[in-house]
Image (spheres, rainbow, N blue to C red):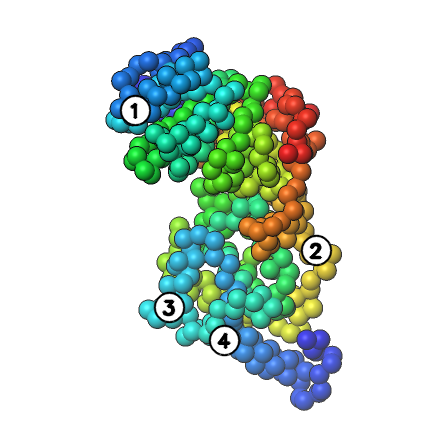
Amino acid sequence: MNPFDLVAQGPAPSGDATRAERGANEAEPGNPTVSALRARFSDAVLGNSVTAGDQDVVHADPARIGEILRWLHDSPAEQYDHLADLTAVDYGGGRPIEVVYQLWSIPHRRALRIRCALPLHALEIESATGIWTGADWLEREVFDLFGVRFAGHPNLRRILMPDDYGEGHPLRKDFPLRGRFSRAEQTRRALNQDPESYYVPGEIGDRVPQVVAAEPGDPSLAEEDHGDEDD
Amino acid sequence: MGVNQSGLPLLGSPAFVTTRLDFVVNWARRNSLWPMPFGTACCAIEMMASAASNFDLARFGMERMSFSPRQADVLICAGRVPYKLAPVLRRIWDQMMQPKWCISMGACASSGGVFDVYSMVQGIDTIVPVDVYIPGCPPRPEGLIYGLMMVQEKIRRESLANHAELRAEDPLAAGRPRAGDQEVADLTGPFGNSTDQNRVSGLVATDAVRRSEDRLP
């Protein structure tokens, strides 16, 4: 087959099972935290797997993620005090968006990855800013690019795209590569921005947080619950 | 400057005086160009190399990189410009005083380059007027120097007789795109490098998986 045909076809479907189901109980964990998590949160841990050789992955229930992360951070036997990364993955095709927490325990020298699958109609998860302050900008980035809302985040607004960006969330698989608006409209909108609203010295300091509102032109936020926008 | 043919004293032929004055003014202008560096990517590294000792832009009169747009003569846009940065570029251009010129350095500044995506300005000539485009990814310092010499050549051919026409600036155009809607569409047409989307992507069917609620109303 011509390799360009493969590109045109796009990614092959990977079956009906979600990652969490496929990864369930597959692997013997190398990290003792996995067993401890399973023992303590037996109903909230949906499965675990090992990837990239020795990276333990735990698939967790998003409804109880705050509890799990708090325990991982506070428990003396775990002490995951370093949030190395917080990101998300969209697998496309209507499958859930997975929020990924990459944790590192400095005292115990252990790495752990937590994944939470969020269905597209309920892209909301508890914020980790109360546990790791560094989650602040990472969660803003995930919100900006995937549209996942973090309940309890102190300042949930866009971080990479302009505040008034009206085309949705660009890293979703269903986002067109060149954006939704024409280039003329994008140029017009770009020049109508007020750059001083975000290129200010106070950006890192005590800037007054803005309310994140779903703009009329933001179609991917249209069906979501707007009840808690002022958090 | 307000100097024109009719306003000059009659020393012999007015045309003779004007051309001599043109020569002096253009000589001064082209040999004391102060660049305003607007470096956003790897092209800026080459721009720094051009200013450093091996290539030494100062030989051509670019003695000083002017980090204040108010004292700069030529804007060198080196690197890709995202839409979020577009108003900054436009404002810097508006803040520069006449006479002023603009160089678009490298593929990304000139056309968007490989970044034919939602976040990137497809050529800064949609935002500001450009005098010289320098191809390359990034261009070598020789390329930048050649571009600056082309600006010098352009200045050499200017005349104070049509100063008002050449250097006219509409205050209402400040902060606006340089190009109209249709021109933007023509300038930024896709090159067909990655997908088969057309320039109104998102409003037409593509292979991308989409949900009905993601369409624009």
Kind of residue at badge 2: Ala
Could you tell me which chain the residue with mark 3 belongs to? B
Give the SS element for disc 2: helix
How crowded pointer 4 is (Cα within 10 Å; few <14, some 14-19, many 20+) is rated as some
Image position of B15 (left or right of B122): right
C-beta proximity under 8 Å, tags 1 and 2: no
Q: Nearer the viewer, residue A162 or A64?
A: A64
Q: Which residue is mark 3?
A: B52
On the image, numbered disc 4 is attached to which residue? B31
A55 shown above or below B212: below
Q: Which residue is mark 1?
A: A32
The residue where tag 2 is placed is B173
Q: CA distance from mark 4 to mark 1?
A: 71 Å
Disc 1 and disc 2 on one polypeptide chain: no
**What amino acid type should be assigned to the residue bearing mark 4?**
Asn
Q: Are marks 2 and 3 in contact (CB under 8 Å)?
A: no
Instruction: Determine the CA span between mark 2 and mark 3.
Output: 36 Å
Whether residue A56 sits left or right of residue A187 in the image: it is left
Cα–Cα gap, marks 3 and 4: 18 Å
Whether discs 3 and 1 lie on one chain: the answer is no
Query: Mark 4 or mark 2, which is nearer to you?
Result: 2
Alpha-carbon span between mark 3 and mark 1: 56 Å
Residue B122 appears at what percent x and percent y? 54, 44
Distance, label 4 to label 2, CA atoms, is: 29 Å
Which residue type does callout 3 highlight?
Ala
Labels 4, 2: one chain: yes
**Residue ID at (34%, 29%):** A77
The nearer-to-camera label among 3 and 4 is 3
Kind of residue indicated by mark 1? Pro
**What chain does mark 4 sit on?**
B
Mark 3 or mark 4: which comes first in sequence? 4
